[in-house]
Image: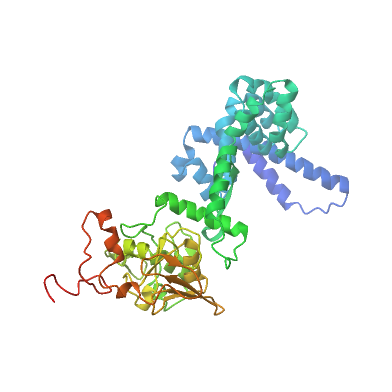
Amino acid sequence: MPAILSPAVTEVVAAVDKLRADESLITAPEMLVGDVEALLEAITVVQAVAVRRLREARAVDATGELYGRSPKRWLVEDLLLPAAEASRLLRLVHQLPAHPATETAHADGQINTGHAAAILTAVQSLPAGIRETVEPHLIERAREFPPEEIAGFVDELLQGLGLDAAGEVRRERRHVQRGVDLATTLAGTRCLTGTLTPEVGERLEAALAIAGQKSGPDDDRTARQRRHDAFGVLADAYLAAQAPSFTGAPRTVIVTLDLDTLEGRRSDTLATLPSGAVVSPDTARRLACDAELIPVVLGRSGEILDIGQADHEFTTPIRRAAYLRDGGRCAFPRCANPCVELHHLVFRRHGGPTSLDNAAWLCPYHHHLVHEGGWTLRRTAEGHYQWTSPHGRQHIRHLDPLGRRSDRNGEGHGSQTLDERAVRRPEDDLGRCVGRAPDRQYPRDRDGRLTRQPGTA
């Protein structure tokens, strides 16, 4: 607390200290309730004075001069107020002067800060021409009801005053109230709240219904969990133009963890994202599976000593060939989700190469199952995908030689694998996409290299 206080605040602080030291035993119900009411009324007045003082401090940049912080950062980082409470105080600082009737009621202790904030929200959602007419009625309502009642009272008030017979003001008010809040909670998780307009809400519901559908009969996620995962799919689709990346790694993810943890020799160390959020080693490995890996050498104190070049991402030809081979679908049998991540069948930490044979396109959900869900995925000798659940149940997705998928659990389309087709590669079919003529007349090995030079027997 600053050493210099105004005389009035000094007296208030002294009174609070005296109150804190009072150990009187009070048993009379009337006195107990009376004390609580009086204290809360005093807090309301003190908050109003604090808002006024904060406005004056902001005008002279007092927090910047003394603490090197903006008013909000000072409230949050030095006084340790919740960010939401700091935002509400600063909103009153900025907006109350434009609404003198509400400011006066707040300063006189007739309404608290919650009432004042609710009145500002309601008034500012109305057309400018009727705000002065409506504001006194909202203040009167606030004297008798809690802040949560203010917003719902506006529609009733407009109808009673005959100001919105056609409902246009109410529709405009709901449009102004649109918004979404995304708050960071424990361990980097997010809390999502907000109000959507009817048209945006309808589009979002339709998108979530598509992105959040069950991937198959074995998908045991709840509807709520699928909607959550669908938000991730929508975000990836926007960031990656809703198509698999054919031009190298689709993202560069910065995750801080030691090499032993990345390569699976340790599992008791958490990884850290740039935001400060911590994730499990399995989650970090999944993020690194289809992303650039940039080696960084850290000193004993965590300082960066050296940084290397990005490595281990799938090349453009491999991504395109794997996409054609897998039929443009997730490698899990009967999965209806779009594939967006290219997975290393043999994990990097187990020495798995970044090659066509070791690649499989997956949707985000089934990529999660492989890394964090206890499932395993391997390619059979015939070139099909074999999934094994944590309980040992196996699922096979069959691939035919032309890359069309067959999800039957019975016979596949033959035992010939993609790599045994000496004359034709999947990526040859994409020759026109990259502006070159396909090399179809020469056999190649499984890494795509020519096994016979032109003109040789």
- Residue 117, relative to residue 273: is it above or below? above
At 37% from the left and 78% from the top, the residue drawn is 350
> What x and y, as percent, mark residue 308?
27, 65
| Residue 270 shows in the view | no
x, y percent for residue 242: 42, 52
Which of the 4 quarters of the picture holds residue 420? bottom left
User: Horizontally, is 296 left or right of 147 in the view?
Assistant: left
Compared across the picture, whether 213 is left or right of 320 comes to right
Image location (x, y in percent) of residue 249: 34, 60
Task: State the colouring used for the structure image.
Answer: rainbow
Q: Which residue lies furthest to the left in this view?
A: 455
Tell which of 142 and 18 is nearer to you: 142
Residue 152 placement (x, y as % from top left): 71, 35
Residue visible at 63% across and 40% down in the picture:
10
Decide: is 62 above or below 422. Answer: above
Image quadrant assignment for residue 412: bottom left
Quadrant the C terminus occupies: bottom left
Q: Residue at x 57, y 36 (%)?
A: 91
How many circles with numbers are drawn on the protein?
0
Residue 431 in view, yes or no: yes
Q: In this view, does 332 lie above or below 159?
A: below
Q: Is residue 155 left or right of residue 187?
A: right
Residue 121 figure quarter: top right
Q: In this view, does 379 lie to the left or right of 165?
A: left
